[in-house]
Image (cartoon, rainbow, N blue to C red):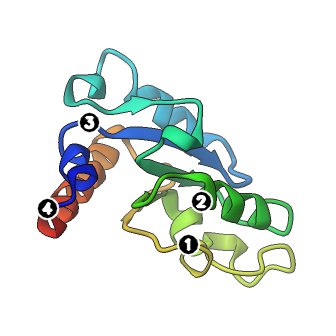
Amino acid sequence: MDIRLKSLTKSLWVFHAALSPCNNCDIEILDLLTPRYDVERFGITLIGSVRHADVLMATGVPNAKTLERFKELYSHAPQPCLVAAIGTCAGGGNMFRDSYNSPCALDEIVPVDVYIPGCPPKPEAMIAGIVKLIEKVKGQS
């Protein structure tokens, strides 16, 4: 059993990657971290460095400027790194799909482990998505 995968079931360190979002998803992520929802009691902590991240929470649509930077972020994260697509824009492009400035979807850049739909998704939906991530990791270990 991979020790890193086992540790992911107890404590997830999350790095927020903003790929040109409208900031609604970002506000809901901040709401998720407040004492009202208190996800830190489950070991979920927002961190400032991708080099320590277990999960990348991506919001927004990858565009021409953020595409290469997100690939670089993902390559700097320790592997296995899980990716959560937060919101409708990260999940499928929403109204920006097939736009001149959105060359591809997020799952064409990196493998996405969980999609959390909504515009913006509520903190309860994000908690449910993180639970799905943990269940996926438990199935791999």
The residue at which mark 3 appears reads as: 11
How far apart marks 4 and 3 lie (CA) works out to 17 Å
> Secondary structure under badge 2?
helix
Q: Quadrant of residue 97?
A: bottom right
Which x, y percent locates residue 139? 13, 67
The residue at which mark 1 appears reads as: 110
Mark sitting earlier along the chain (1/2)? 2
> Secondary structure under badge 3?
loop
Q: Are marks 3 and 2 in contact (CB under 8 Å)?
A: no
How far apart marks 4 and 2 lie (CA) works out to 24 Å
Mark sitting earlier along the chain (4/1)? 4
Asked if residue 118 is positioned above or below residue 12 in the image, the reply reads below
The residue at which mark 4 appears reads as: 1
How far apart marks 3 and 2 lie (CA) works out to 19 Å
What's the residue type where badge 2 is placed? Answer: Tyr
Q: Residue at x 26, y 30 (%)?
A: 43
What's the residue type where badge 4 is placed? Answer: Met
How far apart marks 1 and 2 lie (CA) works out to 8 Å
Asked if residue 138 is positioned above or below residue 99 in the image, the reply reads above
Q: Can residue 37 be seen in this view?
A: no
The mark total stands at 4
Q: Residue at x 42, y 50 (%)?
A: 55
Residue 74 tag number: 2
Mark sitting earlier along the chain (1/3)? 3
- Circle 1 crowding by C-alpha within 10 Å: few under 14, some 14–19, many from 20: some
> Secondary structure under badge 1?
loop
Locate residue 89 relative to residue 140 in the image: left or right: right
